[in-house]
Image: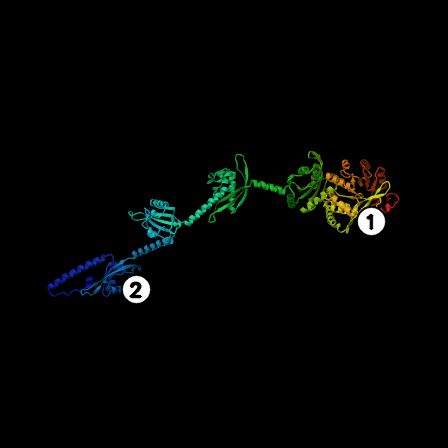
Amino acid sequence: MTLSQSLQQPALPARGHDHGRNGEQHQNAAIDREALLEALLGAFPLPVFYQNRHGRYLGCNRAFENLLGHAREEIIGKTDADLNPEHQAEWHLAQDAALPERGGACDCETKITTAGGTVRDVVVNKVALSGKDGDAAGAIGAIVDVTEHKRAERDLKKALEFAEGIITAIPDVLFEVDEDGRYLQVWTRNPELLAQQKEMLLGRTVNDVLAPDQAAIAMEALREAGKEGVAYGRCICIGLPDGQMRWFELSVARRPSADPAAATTLLALSRDITERKQAEDAINLVRMQLLSVLRTMPDMVWVKDMDGVYLLCNHAFERLTGLAEADVVGKTDFELFDIERARFFRESDKAALEAGECILSDEEWVISRENGQSVLLETRKVPVVDAGGGVVGVLGVARDVTELNVSRQKIHQMAFYDPLTSLPNRSLFNDRLRQMITSAVSRGQRAGVALIDIDHFKVVNDTMGHPVGDQLLCQAAARLKASVRDYDTVARLGGDEFAILLPDIRQGDDLGRIAGTILERFKEGFLLDGKEVFISCSVGIALYPDDSADVNDLVKYADSAMYLAKRSGRNSFRFYSKDLTASAEERMRLESDLRRAIERGELELHYQPKVLLDSGAMIGSEALLRWRHPVMGMIPPVRFIPVAEDTGLIVELGRWVLREACQTAAELNADGGIPHKVAINLSVKQFQSAGLIKSIAEILENTGCRAEWLEIEITESLLLDQKDETLQMLSELRSMGFSIAIDDFGTGYSALNYLARFPIDTLKIDRSFINSADKRNEELVKAILSIARCLGQSVVAEGVETAEQAAFLAANGCGTAQGFLYSKALPKTEIMALWLGSSMGESAGGRL
């Protein structure tokens, strides 16, 4: 059935000829219209369909067939329920039912499934058709595919949403302006960053809103963007409504347009960089302050990049190198310095980079090409790291430590060297001694330690003065250094004591040969204060490992050997032996016990009588100190007096002896008869102690003893020490009533001028002259007796043991003697008994 046939019922034809002809004409007209309609719908690109009032498809065009994927024969007579899914069929029925309510026409969007299975967005346009009687006859519809349009709308919507999201996300302000700087649009999520409200900005220009200088910067950016397409990096300062001044960075771009005739507009992104600007200002301030500090620093400061190119340097660098900063920055060490120095700098830079920490070194720079002056620099180099922790260069700081180094050397010299002789001092000696022993242990070698003491140095120091004594020490130091090997160490330990370290001793006689060389060099005269003086020395030697492997023991043993050399007559050397240790230990034990001897009552005085040679009558005695040790028994003075002398105990012992002797002298002379004179030995140290005269006077007063009952015995060495002071003290003792005797005369530094100058009453001839049968000693005795007679001095001979010795002395004019021939030294009770018995004899003073 055709479209016209479907939509209207044709009239029945009339009977008769006319009627038949008219009907035929009418039918031909219908056929023509139908063909025309079919041709139009077939060519129409949109799918077209028509349905009867019951929704059955009566016809469609080719486009509709293609859309549904069915042939027309499969479509006609079917409903939407037959051709579409259930939900789509229901939608079509609902739309058809509502068609009358919508005035007989509607266009609605829906989705359909094509023959290929794809879902398309379409708009269905339907128009209701009416029959002749005005009743609904059906509907005709056309379908428009809007899938691509909908997709374009969705894409556009997404793009708009994305753009709006970007604008919302960024904290910046986005402007659209024309080439005159007129605000066309403003986008921002932070309206407070606008100089004015958005409504007030639109239509106004940059010049209307910003300060003139800032507007000029903005317009320059707009002009550049209009010409070049973009403009970046310009910053402007804007005053906001709340009174704040904020900095903004402008990024401007020409807005693209597909229409060449469209007016040019510009998009300007304004970013708030106030915090960054403040940080930059703070950094610049710190940088300026740092540069100011660098300019004023006395230390050299420089920075290089990883390639060794200088990035900066300060004034101190310029001053020390003679190079201006402009000539340094941008260059490497190889362009500034000689090749060797440049290589050294580069290697030290690499060392700092590889170490990853500060590298300290000392470098010597020649800083003046004119005079070649050099300075010592203490240099520190450290890697420079960026914010990410990556190493980007090297920072160097160098300090001029030339003067400091000189001071350090002076301090080192003062700490480890003797200021007078420039020899190593005790500290450096001990350090080198430990090194020597350590080396000897590792190499299996022998080594020696020698201690040297100048003989009678104190005499030179006191008689010729300390400056002359210093001359002697310096000359002695030079001779010692000349006597040893190059690798030996000569040190001054203090006073007149020197020490020598002798490593690598290969032959047993090496040490003896070196010691002999020292003694030989000392035999040459010393020129002191324009005078030639002959001075000897004493040397003590200890050997590693023979004597000890301990450094302290080696020094101690060498010291013991040196004192043995002194006691053996000086001007000699001695090797250490174990007997010396035993002697030293005994000496220490004696010193310890001697300090308690007085308070324990272990000391006592014995008295050896003095007699007249012509009559044998006792006229006095010599007080001799004895020590009755609770363990060792009676200890003779020869063992403990040297210890007392060395330790200073002799002063306290001397005071005790003087008090006891005065007490005994008072008792011996209590009867008022013939005087008994007690001789008392006073040591040099007693004369050197303060208050000796006052102490003696107090003892005399406390004991009731008279000075004429005592004779003070001194040694010749006292006459050499402190001559003026000694003369004054002896004169005071003489004026108090004491007689003065020189003990052991002839064994010391006998000098006739001393006998004439000092108030000497008696000379005591040493026993070594009496007990010797040598004719020369006899002649010396005669000479002493002759001198004494000439000077009006009496003579006492010590150590007389035989009648022959007594006869010889008497024959040559000696008046008094003492010795075992007459009596040994007796305790106080015995001497008093002996004196009492002799005083009751017939002759004056009695006889022994």
Q: 637 or 113, which lies in front?
A: 637
Is disc 1 surrounded by few (<14), some (14 to 19) or many (20+) residues within 10 Å? few
Find the distance from the CA under tag 1 to the CA under tag 2. 157 Å
Q: Which residue is mark 2?
A: 87
Give percent across and percent down for residue 755.
77, 37
> What is the three-letter code of the residue carrying label 2?
His
Cβ atoms under marks 1 and 2 closer than 8 Å: no
Give percent across and percent down for residue 360.
54, 44
- Residue 100 is drawn in which quadrant? bottom left
> What is the three-letter code of the residue carrying label 1?
Thr
Which quadrant is home to the N terminus? bottom left
Q: Is residue 740 left or right of residue 268?
A: right
Residue at x-position 82% and y-position 40% = 797
Give percent across and percent down for residue 441.
65, 46
- Residue 847 is drawn in which quadrant? top right
User: In this orientation, does residue 41 appear?
Assistant: yes
User: In this orientation, does residue 78 appear?
Assistant: no
Q: Is residue 340 left or right of residue 47?
A: right
Residue at x-position 35% and y-position 51% = 196
Which quadrant is home to the C terminus? top right
Q: Which residue is mark 1?
A: 829
Tell me the element at label 2: helix
Q: 168 or 798, which lies in front?
A: 798
Q: 534 or 842, which lies in front?
A: 842
Furthest toward the left, the residue is 17
Q: Is residue 500 left or right of residue 191?
A: right
Residue 65, compared with residue 431, is above or below; it is below
Tell me the element at label 1: helix
Q: Is residue 810 left or right of residue 132?
A: right
